[in-house]
Amino acid sequence: MQAIIDACRKGDLNGKVCAVISNNSNSQALEKARIAGVSEYHLSNKTYPEEDELDEAICKVLTESGADIVALAGYMKKLGPKVLKQYRGRILNIHPSLLPKYGGKGMYGIHVHRAVIDAGEKTTGVTIHLVEGEYDTGKIIRQCEIGVLEGDTIDTLSKRVLEREHAFYVETLKLISEGVIKL
């Protein structure tokens, strides 16, 4: 998320971060948004115990902030049906593998990298995909490969993939903003 905020500020990305929403009140994303002067919201089942109310609250923030595209970055919960319907075809997620491999419920962060290493994969990567109702099942927009190096640990692989994720998300959003990639 910070890479996206920075790219918008520098003019490298034609757009702006309208709002940051996190389901975790202690999220670094909320603090980074605050520092950057971006509206930030903690919306979760703690603030909205009923799923339909949470769905409505997220939709309201996105609508009122003027969001055209929703770029998920570390948001770990499923979005509700209202958000999915209103922003259908405009919700992106970034995943630390070459989907469809190593995707789905519970496959995030170190869990993905552990599975890649345990399987003896020679390559992994980053996928940006549209968000639908299930985890990691939406249309793949763009992927990049990253080699798994001999001696890689979960930590070394995770760091290398995360570093690429930051630039790759910005590059992809730029291509979308320029009309090169159509959603």
Image (cartoon, rainbow, N blue to C red):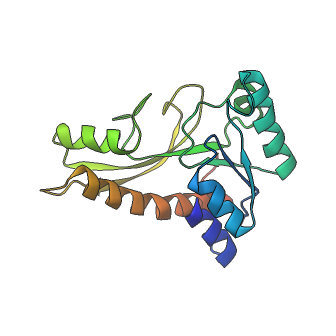
Question: In the figure, 100 relative to 62: above or below?
Answer: above
Q: Nearer the viewer, residue 73 or 183?
A: 73
Going by the picture, which residue comes out furthest to the right?
64
Is residue 82 among what the camera can see? yes
Please identify the quarter of the rendering in which residue 151 is found. bottom left
Q: Quadrant of the C terminus?
A: top right
Q: Position of residue 7 (x, y in %)?
A: 61, 71
Q: Position of residue 45 (x, y in %)?
A: 67, 29
Question: In the figure, 25 relative to 164: above or below?
Answer: above
Q: Position of residue 123 (x, y in %)?
A: 24, 49
Going by the picture, which residue comes out furthest to the left?
150
Horizontal side of 94 relative to 67 (left or right) equals: left
Question: In the figure, 174 relative to 93: above or below?
Answer: below
Horizontal side of 71 relative to 147 (left or right) equals: right
Question: In the figure, 92 relative to 145: above or below?
Answer: above
Horizontal side of 151 relative to 162 (left or right) equals: left
Q: Report the number of numbered marks.
A: 0
Q: Quadrant of the N terminus?
A: bottom right
Q: Position of residue 155 (x, y in %)?
A: 28, 54
Q: Nearer the viewer, residue 25 or 65?
A: 25
Is residue 180 among what the camera can see? no
Horizontal side of 118 relative to 143 (left or right) equals: left
Residue ID at (45%, 57%): 165
Residue ID at (36%, 43%): 98
